[in-house]
Image (cartoon, coloured by chain):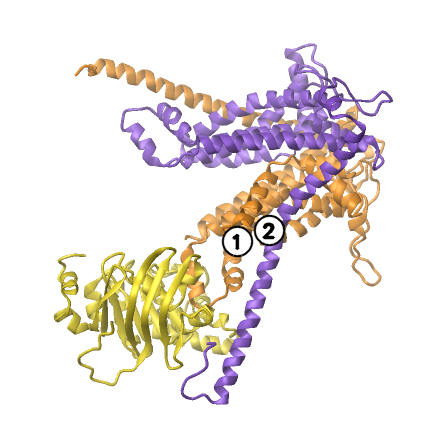
Chain colours: A orange, B purple, C yellow
Amino acid sequence: MAYAKNLDEIRALIVSHKRWDLVFASIGVLALMIGVLTFAALFVDMAVKGVPRLEWDFFTSFPSRHAHKAGILSAWVGSTLVMLTTAFFAVPLGVAAGLYLEEYAPKNWVTDVIEINITNLAGVPSIVYGLLALGLFVYQFGFGQSILSAGLTLALLILPVVIVATREAIRSIPQGIREGAYALGATQWQVCKDHIVPYSFAGILTGVIIGMARAIGETAPIITIGALTFIAFLPPPPLKAEPPFISFEWLTSPFTVMPIQMFNWTSRPEAAFLINAAAAGFVLVLMTLAMNALAIYIRYRLRKKIKW
Amino acid sequence: MSGVAGPASSSMALLEASARLQQRRARMVRERAIEGVLFLAALVSVFTTVGIVYVLVKESVVFFTHVPLWDFLTDTQWTPLFDDAHFGIMVLLSGTLTSSFVALSIAIPLGTIIAIYLSEFAPFGLREVAKPFLELLGGVPTIVYGYFALLFVTPLMQRIYPGLPGFNILSAGIVMGIMIIPYVSSISEDAMRAVPMSLREGSYAMGATRYQTATRVVVPAAFSGIASAYILGISRAVGETMILAVAAGMQPNLTFNPLEPAATITAYIVQVALGDLPHGSIGYQTIFAAGLTLLLLTLLFNIAGHVLRKRFREAY
Amino acid sequence: MVAVPAQVSAPLSAKAEVRKLDFFYGEFQALKGLSMPVHEKQVTALIGPSGCGKSTFLRCFNRMHDLYPGNRYQGEIRLFPDDVDILAHAVDPIEVRMRISMVFQKPNPFPKSIYENVAYGLRVRGESRRVTLNEKVEEALRNAALWDEVKNRLQEPAFNLSGGQQQRLCIARALATDPEILLFDEPTSALDPIATASIEELIHDLKEKVTIVIVTHNMQQAARVSDFTAYMYLGELIEYGVTDEIFIKPKKKQTEDYITGRFG
């Protein structure tokens, strides 16, 4: 047998091959470390510079020309209101679309077109959504440079995330459960509302949280709509003292959001403003971290609770 | 049942049957209506695409009545707001391409290595920690990354290249690259994990090591998924805005040298949006023309990716 | 071909009658010209080797095939006493499923409480009064021989039950709506022998209340549990008759070969 090697040669070969294993594993760990170090540097840098600035008045003051007086009040209120609007549109639309595609859609070209669109939109740069909003929402529909426009834009932006999360959650429901429900005489909608949606709830929630975490940090599309960077007032409150007690004026009010405030401060040369920027950035990172952690926690609990 | 009862066709039975028929019709109408509503929700994605194309094309068409397409593609200056206005998109494209190149030279190798490591080498505990961490890394708001690039990475780079300007493509590109790693690694890793164990077992059974199996069997088998990951990374790099707006400056500059400042297509749009542009002015229209270029660029990459995936679709 | 049982002690009425049933999965014909009766308050077993179409046949009874595109029925299954063809296009499959219930091969309890699992069929019919639901849930669980084991933990998740208990829960769920026919699709093939025995005993008790059609790949089970047996092969009904006769003196050689284990 021409190819037989003696035992020594084989052993030497194995040793040299295994060395490659070790080398690659080390490189892999190194690569991971680059990511870890970057994140650590970012976090620590922002914490060190920004945390001292995180006093009560930072959260309750409007921006100002004087750095030590400037705060993020209008920014975080604006962010909260925009997030509410975003969720209001994105969640029903995304869940309904995901439900349709998984439970109702027939295999024809219309469904294909819809699915191709969703995949495509996931790769469209966020600033293009901003342009869409500017041309369509702000001017064509006349919503103006308002929270409503921002909420709609971000809702469209995170729609693919919610749809994909919904679809995956629905897909993990075994067919036996559906058949059991149908066999008891349930209609398609009854199966969806009594079984499909409740059982996929945790997965959907995870997707929504991840989508919102993304939306909170989005700057480009909001700038494009025309959110102003120096807002020294708050949008009108949603609850009023006189009838009809609920107001929607805040939807059409000018506004700003956290990332834009941070951007504004980062663009100033004065060191004091850069500290404010670090503080705002730290708050942003904490919020993103918290939302991601929440999503991961829900995913973990879900895996333990429902054992298909 | 919709059939009429047999022997005892009393009026009672007839009434029952017609009541059930009515119930059935009402139920069917309700079911169809609900399906219609859900279908409309699914159509929103199509409306979004149509909306994007409509808005971009509408303003671009107006733009191109003022600016010849040839000039747009070949002019080497981009000064739309000057009296002597030039509209050479190449200037902005050079910024986009250079920054993307820097970013992808980091994201693609590191992302692939991390994916291979996590999928084929890492112990289970490490993978469970690394995956959420990488999600976190990719989830940090880009404005924060921009700040980091400007105020941490640039000074760091200036120690290596003393003449480095405060705004430069390199720092922005590096940070962008690290931000994109999770996109590349998570999709590549999913593709590799989807390769069935039986293929790996075949390789191990022949005496191959982990490294050999990973590189010679798993990666080729997962190629189409890895290609998707790369395409996503490219789209992400080309479309990134804030990191570049903050750290690379917003000065249009026709260059392929990462050590200089430059404006990308995306940064230019932001710059214009920050200012005050009257609706209908040429300045307003330029951002849509720029946006259209950007969209076509990402579309190009998507199509290339689709073609690549089709050619290398693995059937195991 | 309708084979009439030779010895009939008590007067038997047909609950349903299958007439020249063909079934197509797209272009493929899975069932060919099936005709046989289903006697009321009796257990009818469908046996045959893998792929003979017995599950496909069973699923025609509650129009399960309608859930998936590309399927087509030809022929009739007439349900009595109102003598309606439940396969007709004009007949709403949902109504059929409200009259004919099914227990599946792999127990498929909903991820809800034990109580809610059993109550679901009633809720689908619009029943929401607590008192009525409580009564019917208890009745169904008693009929499924599960009441004593779960009566103190009705609010617990159904997943906490063992495999055999889950299957009995599914039976209770199917019984709660007082079906006219109860279909069993290989109900014990996923269960251990002890659980299997308890289900078989249950089926024996249940037939006094409801007509039962059971698909089983276990011949001994068919012999133990059923009154009438239909032997199928490659989508055709080879022989139908009283169980004892089929197993002791089958009329066709094909049947005999299968029963004696010469093939299958």
Please give the residue where the numbered disc 2 appears in the rendered image: B42
Instruction: Give yes or no for contact between labels 2 and 1 (Cβ–Cβ under 8 Å).
Output: yes
Question: Residue C167 in the image: x percent, y percent?
Answer: 34, 64
Residue visible at 52% across and 58% down in the picture? A198
A170 is higher (above) or lower (below) than A29 = below
Residue visible at 17% across and 64% down in the picture? C255
Cα–Cα span, label 2 and label 1: 10 Å
B309 is higher (above) or lower (below) than A170 = above
Amino acid type indicated by mark 2? Ala
User: On the same chain: label 2 and label 1?
Assistant: no
A285 relative position to B184: left or right? right
Question: Residue C152 in the image: x percent, y percent?
Answer: 41, 69
Question: Residue B36 in the image: x percent, y percent?
Answer: 60, 59
Please give the residue where the numbered disc 1 appears in the rendered image: A105
Front-most of residues A245 and A58: A245
A97 is higher (above) or lower (below) than A125 = below
A94 relative position to B114: left or right? right
Q: Is residue B178 visible?
A: yes
Amino acid type indicated by mark 1? Ala
